[in-house]
Image: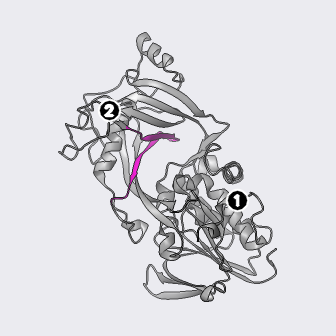
Amino acid sequence: MASTQEKKEIVVIGGGIIGCTSAYFLTRHPAYDPSKHNITLLEASKIAGGASGKAGGLLALWAYPTSLVPLSYRLHAQLAKEHGGETRWGYRQIHCGQLAAKGRPSQTKATLTGKPTNGQSVSLNKRDDKALGKVTAAGLPKDLNWFAADSVQSYYEMGDPNTTAQVHPYHFTTAMAELAEQKGVKIVLGSVTGIDTGNGGGVRSVTYEDKATKETHTITATDVVVSAGPWTQRVYPPAPISGMRAHSVTITPSKPISAYAIFTEISLPPDFGNKDTFLKSKRPHSKTVTPEIYARPNNEAYACGEGDHLVPLPKTTEDVETDLARCQDIIDYVSSISDELKNGEVTVRQACYLPNVEAASAGPLIGQTGVKGLLLATGHTCWGIQNGPGTGKLISEFVFDGKAKSASIGSLDPRKVL
């Protein structure tokens, strides 16, 4: 067991969900003593500036890895109860399903301002007996009434409110940072330029460049948690972590939509997208596309598409390049099966990078590196929000107890791939 009587200088690198939950749970560990334990959270640009602020926020007991998911899912519920998460970060239990549908030719598309290009197509949101018969035959729940009846082919449930929930990722991540800060964590905006590991003997310090002043500073460190997401390898080169760009949009539907997270499989018509009113160009489309659509509280829908590796990982989250054409593809795809989304207002077009583990292990990587005091917590792919609390809890145990106690995560040991 690690000694809790000694003074600790703990540095957490990365202000995404993993870094923020790590900072939060470090301050909630029974051994934490602010008079002896200093915690600094270093973030290059801003808290939740990357995927942690732009993800979908889906939580699921059927997510992966199975060694981590149950703990983290349970902690999400506890955090929401303790800190008013329903109001503060949109925590709620939801349904989740897989929808197969036929896309319709797009007639009304959102412009760059987010508003429809004309006001001619307005859904009355009514279904006659024939339409109701179609969706009933497809297995669509009665309250999942925001998909076009002539598009729906089949539906099956993947999760219910007992196994599936959601949060707004930006609000959740920033709340974790604020709650950690209230307990003594110092948040510093600056880019890490080096970690002194004493030639492998143990961490000694972290050096960074202050974002505002561009001055270089060095912080003494006894424990360093590298949780920089896709930027992890920039901070700690041995880490086998890469980044994949992902685009998403948010839409205010033309009417409130029910609480479902939907994984779609949309078959597009042959001439789909030939009449592009957004970029005045003809873009190729796959015959089948698979955007995900999450209904959020306050009448917001989040939709995301497939990832790409077309643009290398930039210096910081503030330098991420958003491809507006890819965002428009997502808008067109979801609009082809839902009038509520087609006639809604697009409020955000954005991109981020997801961290992937480039090793036989699927990841994430959580725990000791073989260098005394140096821990990794990264490679969570698309399940970072879901697995953030569990990861943060375990990191606090590695720092103060010397080992993971709340879950058996030997399969996620970074030393297996370093």
Q: Position of residue 51 (x, y in %)?
A: 48, 58
Span highlighted in magenta in the image: 289-310
Q: Which residue is mark 2?
A: 268
Please state if 45 lies on the left or on the right of 160 as rendered.
left
**Amino acid residing under circle 1:** Ile
Task: Please tell me whether residue 45 is drawn above or below residue 307 in the rendered image.
Answer: below
Residue 306 located within the stretch drawn in magenta: yes
Residue furthest out toward the front: 360
Helix, strand or loop at disc 1?
loop
Q: Nearer the viewer, residue 27 or 224?
A: 224
Q: Residue at x 64, y 70 (%)?
A: 415
Q: Position of residue 304 (x, y in %)?
A: 42, 46
- Mark 1, Cα crowd under 10 Å, few <14 / some 14-19 / many 20+, is some
Q: Nearer the viewer, residue 340 or 69?
A: 69
Helix, strand or loop at disc 2?
loop
**Amino acid residing under circle 2:** Leu
Q: Residue at x 27, y 30 (%)?
A: 105
Query: Where is residue 317, by image quadrant?
Result: bottom left
Task: Please tell me whether residue 402 is drawn above or below residue 105 in the rendered image.
Answer: below
Residue furthest out toward the top: 129
Task: Nearest to the eye among marks 1 and 2: give it.
Answer: 1
Please state if 300 lies on the left or on the right of 88 as rendered.
left
Q: Quadrant of the C terminus?
A: bottom right
Q: Position of residue 392 (x, y in %)?
A: 66, 63
Q: Nearer the viewer, residue 271 or 386?
A: 271
Q: Which residue is mark 1?
A: 409
Please state if 117 lies on the left or on the right of 83 as rendered.
left
Q: Main secondary structure of the magenta part?
A: strand
Q: Quadrant of the N terminus?
A: bottom right
Task: Please tell me whether residue 308 is drawn above or below residue 367 in the rendered image.
Answer: above
